[in-house]
Image: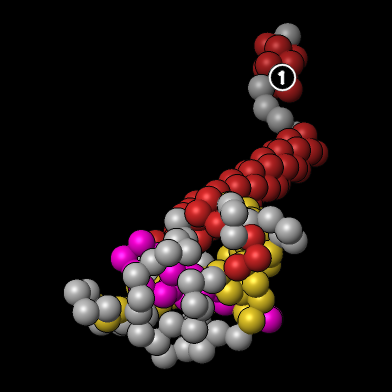
């Protein structure tokens, strides 16, 4: 009687080898599924973060570009080295734009070979103002590792509006952005917004 009781107790006290193997297999499947979900979530997070950073960089660049263009003046002070004659000129390939800004300097903007925005202020000399030429650009940190892959300008026909197409990218993402800059001071001088050649210093 005692022997039979011991056998019954021992029979209920552990797992068989088959049960352990099945349990381990199920545990491995759960771990694999969890790893897949976590990996996918991390990829989505990284992609969203990258797109967000790209958008911040693109918007910062676009605000500078459209802000400068919108403030173009047809009656700026005379300057040396300007080929615009107080016009807004978009290069024939659309990769450069030139105009006169409030200090009296002719300005041209373009993307350099390193994928960075360059705003070049030509020298000013009108007898009372003498300013040297200056190349302005954002510091490297603003780009967050991104570079400009496209920067083009075009004239919205019959208007005082310039269309700006901008793309920034890096290995893990990119962002395309289009904006329009209304040249308020050229509202009555639409004919002075033209395509043409732009000479560089």
Q: Position of residue 159 (x, y in %)?
A: 69, 55
Task: Please name the residue shown 45% across and 61% down the image.
Answer: 73
Q: Position of residue 170 (x, y in %)?
A: 57, 68
Viewer-closest of 97 and 95 = 97
Task: Please name the residue shown 47% across and 64% down the image.
Answer: 74
Task: Please name the residue shown 65% across and 65% down the image.
Answer: 191
Against 3, residue 80 (above or below) is below
From the viewer's perspective, tell me whether residue 67 is left or right of residue 54: left
Viewer-closest of 45 and 162 = 162
Magenta-colored span: 92-108
Question: Where is residue 190, by image quadrant?
Answer: bottom right
Viewer-closest of 105 and 21 = 105
From the viewer's perspective, tell me whether residue 84 is left or right of residue 106: right
The residue beneath circle 1 is: 12
Q: Position of residue 64 (x, y in %)?
A: 45, 58
Q: Is residue 94 magenta?
A: yes
Label 1 Cα neighbours within 10 Å, binned few <14 / some 14-19 / many ≥20? few
Q: Quadrant of the N terminus?
A: top right
Mark count: 1
- Please, what secondary structure does the residue beneath circle 1 have? loop
Question: Where is residue 140, by image quadrant?
Answer: bottom left
Q: Position of residue 76 (x, y in %)?
A: 39, 66
From the viewer's perspective, tell me whether residue 2 is left or right of residue 200: right
- Is any atom of residue 71 visible in this view? yes
From the viewer's perspective, tell me whether residue 130 is left or right of residue 167: left
Q: Residue furthest top?
A: 1
Question: Where is residue 168, by image quadrant?
Answer: bottom right
Q: Is residue 86 magenta?
A: no
Viewer-closest of 47 and 143 = 143
Q: Quadrant of the C terminus?
A: bottom left
């Amino acid at each position: 009687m005692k022997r039979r009781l011991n056998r019954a107790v021992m029979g209920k006290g552990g797992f068989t080898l088959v049960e352990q193997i099945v349990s381990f297999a199920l545990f491995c499947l759960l771990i694999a599924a969890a790893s897949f979900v976590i990996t996918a979530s991390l990829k989505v997070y990284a992609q969203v973060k990258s797109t967000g950073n790209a958008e911040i960089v693109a918007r910062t660049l676009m605000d500078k570009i459209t802000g400068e263009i919108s403030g173009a003046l047809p009656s700026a002070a005379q300057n040396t080295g300007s080929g615009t004659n107080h016009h807004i000129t978009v290069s024939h390939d659309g990769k450069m734009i030139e105009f006169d800004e409030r200090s009296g300097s002719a300005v041209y903007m373009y993307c350099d070979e390193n994928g960075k925005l360059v705003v070049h202020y030509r020298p000013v000399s009108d007898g009372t103002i003498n300013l040297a030429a200056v190349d302005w650009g954002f510091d490297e940190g603003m780009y967050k590792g991104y570079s400009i892959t496209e920067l083009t300008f075009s004239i919205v026909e019959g208007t005082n509006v310039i269309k700006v197409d901008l793309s920034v990218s890096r290995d893990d993402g990119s962002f395309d952005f289009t904006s329009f800059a209304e040249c308020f001071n050229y509202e009555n001088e639409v004919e002075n917004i033209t395509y043409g050649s732009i000479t560089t210093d």
